[in-house]
Image (tube, grey):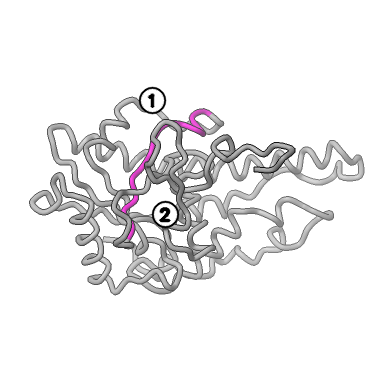
Amino acid sequence: MPPSAVEFDDSPSWISDPEFHQPRYPGDPRCRRSVMAELKVILSLRHGHRPFRWGFAIVRTAYGPGSDEQFQKVINILHRVVQVRTANEAKGVKADIVWDKEASAILDHISDEVDMRPNEEFLRRFENDILADKEVLEDASLPAVRTYFKNWIASKNGTDLYGDMRFAACIMIDTETLHQFTTTSEGFPRENNEGYRSSYWLKLVDTETHLYEPVRVRVYGADDFKKYWFDRNLRRLPMSDLTHKDNDNDPGVLYFGNAPPWTMSKISIYGW
């Protein structure tokens, strides 16, 4: 049972504190925090059954031996990724302040401590919906998953028109996905760059019916599932405008994000 909307109001008492809005010096990193911009997006989500929260509908289609434990491992990894990503945001802000202080002696009095309340709030408001139905979803095809997802959206009076990407695409956890995560190390990902461009992927099933295959999105990295959620919320584009098929390892497979630069046509002095 999800917490009530009262517990997830749209105005945490500290969000207007001066330290987030009044720079101590020009360009103060603590007043330009990405986590605050992301929280602003989350707090604008007033509709749907999980107001003021962000996350995904996760459709489980794998129900074989040992799949319960494997599925829970994937869910834990997703939560861990969000935890590490938001912790790294705070570390980046601290590093920027330290760099500024080293570059200017007049900033010696400036504290480089970073307020973690936005990061804790961001993580607290990450909630997923688990859609599991062995009789209907076991080894389900993409069209069947899409139909199930769209029926669920209708049951929640859901719409992505207000920016809730929970209703734009779901994560499909199938046998292939579970098998992929059997190789993840304990504590993955750690709070550093380890695995930032890892080979682990999730499959997104969009409501767009002309997409005949799932879209792969990185678990942890530059174009991971967190980036997808907030990027699509900002740009409000159809999935087909946010994908590419330029992965050398899997040519023809749809991936979220920008194509790697090495796949683009080379330019000579004579042009393309």
Seen in the picture, residue 260 relative to 194 is either above or below; the reply is below
Residue at 34 percent across and 50 percent down: it is 204
Answer with mark 2 or mark 1, whichever residue precedes in sequence: 2
Give the residue type at disc 1.
Answer: Ser
Do the numbered discs 2 and 1 sit on residues whose CB atoms are within 8 Å? no
Identify the image quadrant of the N terminus: bottom left
Residue at 28 percent across and 48 percent down: it is 172
Residues in magenta, as a range:
194-206
Neighbour tally class for label 2: few under 14, some 14-19, many 20 plus, Cα within 10 Å: some
Residue 162, picture quadrant: bottom left
Residue 19, picture quadrant: bottom right
- Would residue 106 appear left or right of 232 to someone viewing this image? right
Q: Nearer the viewer, residue 57 or 214?
A: 214
How far apart are the two marked residues, 2 and 1, measured between alpha carbons?
23 Å
Percent position of residue 190, x then y: 49, 31
Element assignment for label 2: loop
Percent position of residue 270, x then y: 72, 40
Neighbour tally class for label 1: few under 14, some 14-19, many 20 plus, Cα within 10 Å: few
Residue at 52 percent across and 43 percent down: it is 259
- Would residue 267 appear left or right of 244 to someone viewing this image? right
The residue under label 1 is 185
Q: Nearer the viewer, residue 130 or 210?
A: 210
| Residue furthest to the left | 135
Residue 55, numbered circle: none
Residue 126, numbered circle: 2
Percent position of residue 122, x then y: 50, 54
Percent position of residue 100, x then y: 81, 42
Seen in the picture, residue 203 relative to 182 is either above or below; the reply is below
Residue at 57 percent across and 55 percent down: it is 118
Instruction: Tell me if residue 261 is in the magenta stretch.
Output: no
